[in-house]
Image (cartoon, helix red, strand yellow):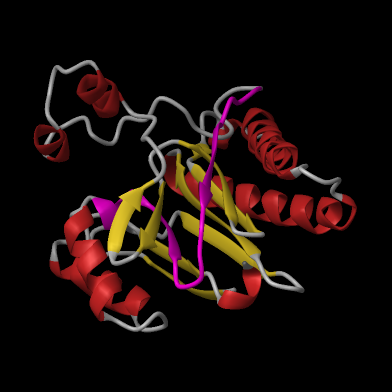
């Protein structure tokens, strides 16, 4: 497993409310999480940091004793604990009431990527020269697309495209979406916030991953997003699958 990541404040924000964490694992494989905070002054920044730190602590504690086929339980438990940690901070601190964060997390082991997410931060897989979106945005605009009221092209320009319907920390419980995806040597998993996907199309992201080396791709993606306006914080996390992990 190889990992390359960066986060940037963008061109229009006063602070960076994104956060991420990733780890390689002994014997191949690894995991990563990306969060995009929301909620006034410092609330979003703190929410995303609490969530990523809680996920990190959960993996560190539970991975060594994870039972066979326990990946789904592990990743969903990490999201549940992150949700409760953010919610407890928000409800105990008046100035942070209502804060929350998106979250997308991937755990790769044995040729399978296990993915959980809440909100509109996304996971993609780049396989055989093609980029495929793995997650479905939890957003008002995605609901309009799903119901056929607007097209994907209209969604990209919709004034309410940033209104999300699910997030960590805004309620006492969370129901993240979980899925799996087969991965093979040479595949790249991309976790990112909407600061990237609002500035670049999937086709543009895929072309950069196809034409750029793994460790230079995050910076090139960032520069293209900034050139496109950089209207939000931008976080890019790449996880590259290597042959020994199959």
Q: Is residue 164 left or right of residue 166?
A: left
Q: Position of residue 146 (x, y in %)?
A: 26, 22
Does 240 appear above or below 213? above
Q: Is residue 11 visible?
A: no
Q: Residue at x 62, y 47 (%)?
A: 51
Residue 49 located left or right of residue 59: left
Q: Is residue 162 left or right of residue 179?
A: left
| Residue 186 within the magenta-colored segment of the rendering | yes
Q: Quadrant of residue 199?
A: bottom left
Q: Is residue 117 above or below residue 231?
A: above
Magenta residues, start to end: 173-197
Give the number of callouts.
0
Residue 3 higher or lower than 105, as above or below = below
Can residue 244 be seen?
yes
Residue 20, percent across and down?
54, 60
Determine the residue positioned at 37% across, 62% down: 127
Image quadrant occupied by the C terminus: bottom right
101 and 132: which is toward the camera? 132
The reply, left or right, for residue 43 in relation to residue 12 is: right
Quadrant occupied by the N terminus: bottom right
Residue at 59% x, 23% y: name it. Answer: 171
Task: Please tell me which residue is depicted at 60% across the width and 31% down the height of the picture.
Answer: 94
């Amino acid at each position: 497993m190889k990992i390359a990541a960066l986060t940037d404040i963008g061109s229009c924000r006063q602070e960076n409310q994104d956060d991420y964490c990733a780890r390689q694992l002994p014997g191949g494989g690894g995991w990563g999480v990306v969060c995009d905070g929301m909620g006034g002054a410092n609330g979003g920044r703190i929410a995303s940091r609490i969530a990523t730190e809680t996920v990190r602590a959960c993996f560190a504690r539970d991975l060594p004793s994870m039972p066979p086929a326990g990946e789904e339980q592990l990743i969903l438990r990490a999201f549940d604990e992150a949700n409760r940690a953010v919610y407890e901070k928000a409800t105990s601190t008046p100035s942070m009431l209502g804060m929350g964060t998106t979250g997308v997390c991937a755990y790769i082991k044995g040729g399978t990527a296990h993915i959980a997410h809440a909100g509109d931060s996304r996971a993609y897989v780049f396989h055989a020269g093609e980029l495929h979106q793995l997650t479905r945005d939890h957003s008002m605009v995605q609901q309009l697309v799903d119901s056929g009221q607007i097209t994907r092209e209209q969604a990209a320009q919709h004034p309410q495209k940033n209104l999300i319907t699910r997030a960590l920390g805004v309620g006492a419980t969370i129901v993240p979406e979980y899925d799996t995806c087969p991965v093979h040597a040479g595949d790249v998993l991309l976790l990112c916030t909407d600061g990237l996907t609002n500035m670049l199309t999937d086709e543009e992201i895929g072309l950069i991953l196809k034409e750029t080396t793994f460790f230079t791709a995050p910076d090139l993606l960032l520069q293209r997003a900034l050139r496109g306006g950089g209207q939000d914080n931008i976080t890019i996390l790449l996880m590259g699958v290597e042959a020994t992990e199959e």
